[in-house]
Every structure is written in C-alpha cells, then in structure tokens.
Image (cartoon, helix red, strand yellow):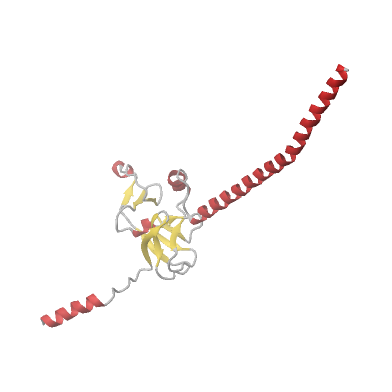
C-alpha cells in the first residue's frame, strides 16, 4: 500500500501539470498585468465574467466606495471588481479592442465577449468607455497599442518636420552668407570712393 502511494507521488512529480480548460491567463503587459489568450478565441465567444460584490448606490456606505475596478451596471447597481477572484479586472483598456463588455443589468452580470478572432498570446482588451477614460487614462495618456502607434507616428512626423525646417534655415543661411559678405565689401568700397572724391 505504501509502495503504491509513493509511486503515485513519484508519477505526479514527473508528469507535467494538466493544462487549464480556461482560454486565458494573467501575464505581464506594457501597462502592468493583463489577460492573455492561451487558446484561439472565436469572434462572439463569451470569454470571462466580470465578477464581484454588487453595490447599491442608494446605500451611502456602498455609494462611497471608490476604486478603479467599479463597473457600473446602471444608475443604481455597480459591480466592485476589486476582489482577487475577478480575473477579468486584469483586462486592459484599448481604443481598438478585440473584446467588449456585455452588460446585463437585470441579471446584475457583465460578461466580456470577443468581437474579433483572438489568437493565443494576444492580450484581451476592451474599451472602458468615455467616463473612465477621462477620469483615469487621459491624465496619464492612454497606453493601448493603438494610441502608442499613433503617438510614435506623430513623434516621427514632428521629427521630420523639424529636420525640414532646420534644412531650410541652413540653406537660407548658406545663400544669404556670400550675398551678405559681398554687400559688406561693396558698401565699404563705395563709401571709400565717395570719401576719396570728396577729399580731392
């Protein structure tokens, strides 16, 4: 009996862990932690539920709760997604998302659903909405890949424009350089002649 138990333990140590049935995992992202696909996720698939205690805005103690993981269902009900069980809280914002929130106020539930085919390794993201964006993301600048690409493009365009302006200024200075020197010589020479004639 002891032998078979130790053999089972040995097999468990040698065999790799069985992969999770979930199609996502928490991993490192540019903005901290994020949720990444571990399997292909088809467009329209419900990925994960946004989970947490339901808060009632009519109860003052619950209405005063403030954190970045509050998901408003309607004017009265809000999900407090700050609980550790809620892996959906790791889904980051994107201005060009591959998922969206499917809000069901009557059921007091929110599901995150794919709006594009998502490949393994892709980060799952959705648009947090205007209110959240203005309150939390705009002051620090959106870090989603779409905005990062846009900022890189704008910076590159600004660099090109600065280089063009600098080149134009240098060409202008080069053209003006010999002319300015000529003018100085001619003016100096002309003044001398006038003075010479006046003296004679």
Residue 109 can be seen in this image? no
- 141 up-or-down from 35: above or below: above
**In the displayed structure, does residue 187 sit left or right of residue 101?**
right
**In the displayed structure, does residue 198 sit left or right of residue 118?**
right
Residue at the left extreme of this rendering: 2
Q: Nearer the viewer, residue 132 or 17?
A: 17
- Residue 48 in the image, given as x and y percentages of width and height: 38, 63
Quadrant where the image shows the C terminus: top right
The residue that appears at 17% across and 81% down in the rendered structure is 7
Quadrant where the image shows the N terminus: bottom left
Residue at the front extreme of this rendering: 200
- Residue 74 in the image, given as x and y percentages of width and height: 41, 50
- 81 up-or-down from 191: above or below: below
Residue at the top extreme of this rendering: 199
Q: Nearer the viewer, residue 185 or 85?
A: 185
- Residue 38 in the image, given as x and y percentages of width and height: 39, 68
- 84 up-or-down from 165: above or below: below
The residue that appears at 79% across and 27% down in the rendered structure is 188
């Amino acid at each position: 009996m002891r032998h078979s138990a130790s053999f089972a333990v040995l097999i468990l140590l040698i065999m790799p862990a069985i992969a999770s049935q979930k199609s996502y995992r928490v991993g490192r992202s540019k903005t901290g932690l994020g949720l990444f696909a571990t399997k292909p996720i088809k467009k329209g698939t419900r990925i994960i539920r946004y989970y947490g205690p339901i808060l009632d805005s009519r109860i003052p103690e619950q209405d005063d709760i403030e954190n970045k993981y509050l998901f408003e269902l309607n004017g009265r009900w809000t999900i407090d997604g700050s609980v550790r069980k809620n892996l959906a809280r790791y889904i980051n914002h994107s201005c060009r998302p591959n998922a969206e929130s499917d809000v069901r106020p009557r059921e007091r539930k929110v599901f995150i659903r794919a709006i594009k085919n998502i490949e393994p390794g892709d980060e799952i993201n959705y648009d947090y909405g205007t209110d959240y964006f203005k309150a939390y993301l705009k002051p620090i600048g959106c870090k989603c890949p779409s905005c990062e690409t846009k900022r890189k493009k704008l910076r590159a365009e600004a660099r090109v424009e600065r280089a063009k302006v600098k080149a134009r200024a240098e060409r202008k200075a080069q053209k003006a350089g010999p002319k300015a020197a000529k003018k100085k010589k001619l003016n100096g020479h002309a003044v001398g002649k006038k003075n010479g004639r006046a003296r004679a």
